[in-house]
């Protein structure tokens, strides 16, 4: 596996894990239990956002620059939120205005935030390397 492929796979896994964490915290905040009955609660809450995340990766061609905060992160975030809400609506799950706002802000912090931290760390490492002159 090339470094580029490994970076893209890692970024996709990080995004998916963060979407599941978002769903788990949401369930816990509403005293629904993270897993719900028969362990299906978390899957029911997360799947619309995970499906939209996959679409976001396709729409933005995220594999080209998987860790770019603006070029990739913002687009992936926007499609994940919009698509997740559309899928929730289509399947009869709630999309109250307060939930949409909380989901949008939380997923922005998670999906764009980790990329911003990664870019900052990489920039600082490059600056601290001695030049090879």
Image (cartoon, rainbow, N blue to C red):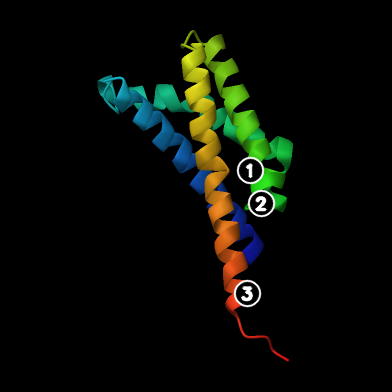
Closest to the observer: 16 or 29? 29
Q: Disc 2 versus disc 1: distance between alpha carbons? A: 6 Å
Q: Position of residue 71 (x, y in %)?
A: 72, 46
Find disc 1 in the rendering and name its residue. 73
Q: Within 10 angstroms of label 2, few (less than 14), some, or many (20 or more) residues?
A: some
Q: Residue at the top extreme?
A: 92
Q: Is residue 22 above or below residue 71?
A: above
Residue drawn at point x = 54 percent, y = 46 percent: 113
Q: Nearer the viewer, mark 3 or mark 2?
A: 3
Q: Position of residue 59 (x, y in %)?
A: 72, 35
Q: Within 10 angstroms of label 1, few (less than 14), some, or many (20 or more) residues?
A: many
The reply to whether callout 2 and callout 1 are in contact (CB within 8 Å) is yes
Find disc 2 in the rendering and name its residue. 68
Residue 127, labelled with which disc?
A: 3
- Secondary structure at numbered mark 1: helix
Residue drawn at point x = 60 percent, y = 81 percent: 129
Q: Position of residue 121 (x, y in %)?
A: 55, 63
Residue drawn at point x = 56 percent, y = 18 percent: 85
Closest to the observer: 101 or 107? 101
- Secondary structure at numbered mark 2: loop
Q: Position of residue 2 (x, y in %)?
A: 64, 65
């Amino acid at each position: 596996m090339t470094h580029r492929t490994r970076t893209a796979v890692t970024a996709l896994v990080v995004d998916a894990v963060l979407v599941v964490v978002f769903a788990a915290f949401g369930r816990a905040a509403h005293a629904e239990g993270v897993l719900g009955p028969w362990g299906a609660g978390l899957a029911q809450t997360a799947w619309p956002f995970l499906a939209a995340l996959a679409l976001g990766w396709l729409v933005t061609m995220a594999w080209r620059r998987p860790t770019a905060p603006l070029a990739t992160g913002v687009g992936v975030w926007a499609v994940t939120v919009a698509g997740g809400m559309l899928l929730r609506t289509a399947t009869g799950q709630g999309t109250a205005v307060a939930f949409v706002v909380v989901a949008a802000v939380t997923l922005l912090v998670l999906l764009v935030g980790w990329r911003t931290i990664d870019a900052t760390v990489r920039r600082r490492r490059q600056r601290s390397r001695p030049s090879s002159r």
